[in-house]
Amino acid sequence: MNICIIGAGYVGLTTAAVLAELGHEVHCIDHDERKIRLLNNGEVPFYEPGLEELIVKNYNYLTFSGRWDYIKRAAVVVICVGTPPRPDGGTDLSYIEAVLDRLAATIESYKTIVTKSTVPPGTNEWMRAELIRKGVKPQLFRIVSNPEFLREGSAVYDMFHPNKIVVGLEPDDDQSLTVVQAMYAGINAPYVTTSLAGAELIKYASNAFLATKISFINEMARICDAFSVDVNDVARGIGLDPRIGPHFLQAGLGYGGSCFPKDIKSLEYVARSRQVEPYLLQAVQTVNDTQLDVCFQKLNEQLAPLTDKKIAVLGIAFKPNTDDTRFSPAEALIRRLSENGCTVAAYDPKATLSEPLAHVTQVQSVHEAIQGADVLVIATDWDEFRTLDWPQVKAAMNGTLVFDGRNCLDRHAVEQSGLRYMGVGCP
Ligand code: UDX
Ligand code: UDX
């Protein structure tokens, strides 16, 4: 099929590359000229494992521009533009609106319009009404909600191996499911078909539930601290129950990224807009918002006074295998240390600090970061930090404390080198 992707971000670009690999003719439109220039030079404007290779491999089927007339040739239009949070917690749909304006000015033949951006329930119905209000004939298009569940850092793998494909359809739409199945032909996954709002809520509920697991284990970590129990034992114990499952039970600095924080706020916002009190969603956010305080307090107890202490922080990205620092707990910790007068040497294999911070230097290696450090903090669980040479680390540091803010290290190996290990919820 001839497919047009709007928005060349993490979701849009991965979708474009995967669909081209499946054999479709794909054109990706983005209003960011710099991004388009880079992509036409075979460069991906952000780090995502395997994505650049997949784009280069499919160059014959994949093109990039800022030109909307490409829409005319496409049978399917996939919307992947940003849906950033509003200050009041709602979702900013202005980019979606901008896309609708362009589509209304361009559509002349039948299109299946697929929304992949994460949008609040009711948005796809509103988009249909808006297109008709802007003059598009109702018989010239169908709207489909097809939320994406890929994770940054494993986006390409996740898109080739989804655990489900969710398709939200208009009530009387008996043709778009076939179109979506043709689009994903070659990807083996169960289809979940539902209404437009059903699909929108499946996406929100997924992210909200995963975040709830994280806040649950972080709260358990606080209780474990009070009883000198290792939260990792608790996570392992409860995770063996298939009704609970072992995933997303890693205690640490809390969840971040471009999705969980904004999607849970948005779900809370829409619940309130319908007079539904979101007790649980609020609690999930309260635990996450205070997790940094808990971790900072632990450091303060060990190192007070913090001022003038030299702290090596390994990790800036919100999670490993990405350069994305949007709502990064690691960066929030670095900011907090800076505000408390600490001297910080921060290192990340791919990510860059999103703003200059007082007394904070971003260095180019672990070796540089740990020189003379009073404490070493693991803030993002990159693999390279799990296998450090701990005797060497001890020799380079001034202090002996390792704070594992992601509970990802082999505690035994750290302590064998004579360093002191402190985790989250580990006695
Ligand atoms: C986006 C949404 O933000 C998220 O809610 C959804 O879950 C998945 O898609 P992401 O791909 O990470 O997430 O967004 P981002 O990396 O910000 O990419 C959006 C792209 O759309 C950017 O490249 C931006 O330049 C482009 N864009 C935005 C347009 O081309 N036109 C617009 O009008 C607005
Ligand atoms: C998430 C969802 O997983 C994905 O399905 C959706 O499409 C987009 O949002 P992503 O934001 O890329 O993906 O990252 P994810 O791997 O889910 O991690 C989110 C945050 O939770 C990270 O900050 C991570 O460090 C944290 N996390 C994750 C924990 O603190 N503990 C865990 O056990 C798992």
Image (cartoon, grey):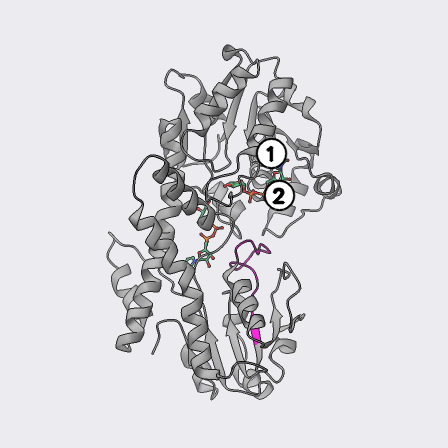
Q: Residue at x 37, y 36 (%)?
A: 273
Question: Which image quarter holds the C terminus?
Answer: bottom left
Q: Which percent across, then down, holds residue 31?
A: 68, 35
Q: Which percent across, then down, holds residue 30?
A: 66, 35
Range shown magenta: 312-327
Q: Nearer the viewer, residue 139 or 341?
A: 341
Depicted 307 relative to depicted 355: above or below: below
What's the mark number on residue 28? none
Disc with the residue nearer the chain's start (1 vs 2) = 1
Badge 2 crowding class, 10 Å Cα cut-off, few under 14, some 14 to 19, many 20 or more, is some
Q: Nearer the viewer, residue 99 or 159?
A: 99
Residue at label 1?
20
Residue 411: quarter of image: bottom left
Q: Name the side, left or right, on which 232 lies relative to 311.
A: left
Q: Is residue 385 visible?
A: yes
Residue at label 2?
54
